[in-house]
Amino acid sequence: MMEVDRDDGRSPNQLRPLACSRNLLNRAHGSARWSQGNTIVLAAVYGPKAGTRKNENPEKASIEAIWKPKTGQIGKPEREYEMILKRTLQSICVLTIHPNTITSVILQVINDDGSLLPCAINAACAALLDAGIPLKHLAVAVCCGLTESGSVILDPTKLEEQKMQGFSYLVFPNSAHTVLLKGPSQMDSEPMEHGVITSVTHGVMPAILLANMANIYVDDYLHSLERGRSASAKISAFIRRSLQSQVPDDPSKVK
């Protein structure tokens, strides 16, 4: 397949510039502002608080994700985002340490210029770390898009997303002890380093995969997986550098 020329001059494998600021909100137990290019999400963590929601296991902690769009009311896509976020975050948190508690993670969209859900997942993970929530491993999210010409690109912008045949949101694990600054390792014995925590596909790829047609689309998905795993290593390295910095990313607080 031919490689695609991107409007912003990036190569297909190139991520937009990353930035992360932590400890921004006085009233939250943890917070982080994550940006990928012009896509920006602010995450706030409140808890753990005593009690669990109905139908939740009281012998374990529970996580709730609350999505706040930049403008307007929350709709079906945002509800789907909340479900994916909850499932992803609960899979990486150690839920047995604070049983019968709930931790709320609020995601406020500041600006959406593409790859919004992966940006929100990365923001949520940074905020959980800032709050000191025990983690089994870190989740690192990336979006892989399939262009009209059949090329796979990473971290598409909003304009690029509108031209996609399909795209995948991929969430990979990264060992907690490689990014946490201190404290005992919370890693489980399960081998997660080369697995995938969450995979959500939209567009042509899932339709073809579910119908078990055309091996080329299976190859496209596997190609996306390979590209995504490579990109997640770069994001993990960025998070590690950010966490190891002893100087606050932004000394100002938003009240």
Image (spheres, rainbow, N blue to C red):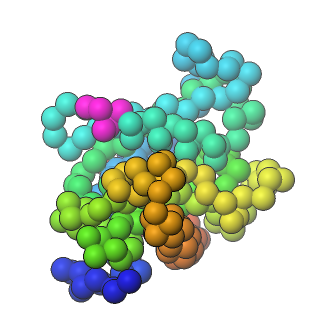
User: Looking at the rendering, in which quadrant would you find the N terminus?
Assistant: bottom left
Q: In the image, residue 74 lies at what x, y percent?
A: 25, 32
> Magenta residues: mostly which secondary structure?
helix
Q: In the image, residue 240 lies at what x, y percent?
A: 58, 71
Is residue 20 in view from this perspective?
A: no
Q: Which residues are drawn in magenta?
A: 75-79
User: Looking at the rendering, in which quadrant would you find the C terminus?
Assistant: top left
Q: Residue furthest left?
A: 72
Left or right of 68, for residue 26 = right
Left or right of 190, for residue 144 = left
Q: Residue at x 61, y 19 (%)?
A: 56
Figure check: 140 above or below 244? above
Q: In the image, residue 205 lies at what x, y percent?
A: 41, 57
Q: Residue at x 64, y 63 (%)?
A: 174
Q: Residue at x 74, y 22 (%)?
A: 59
Q: Residue furthest top?
A: 54
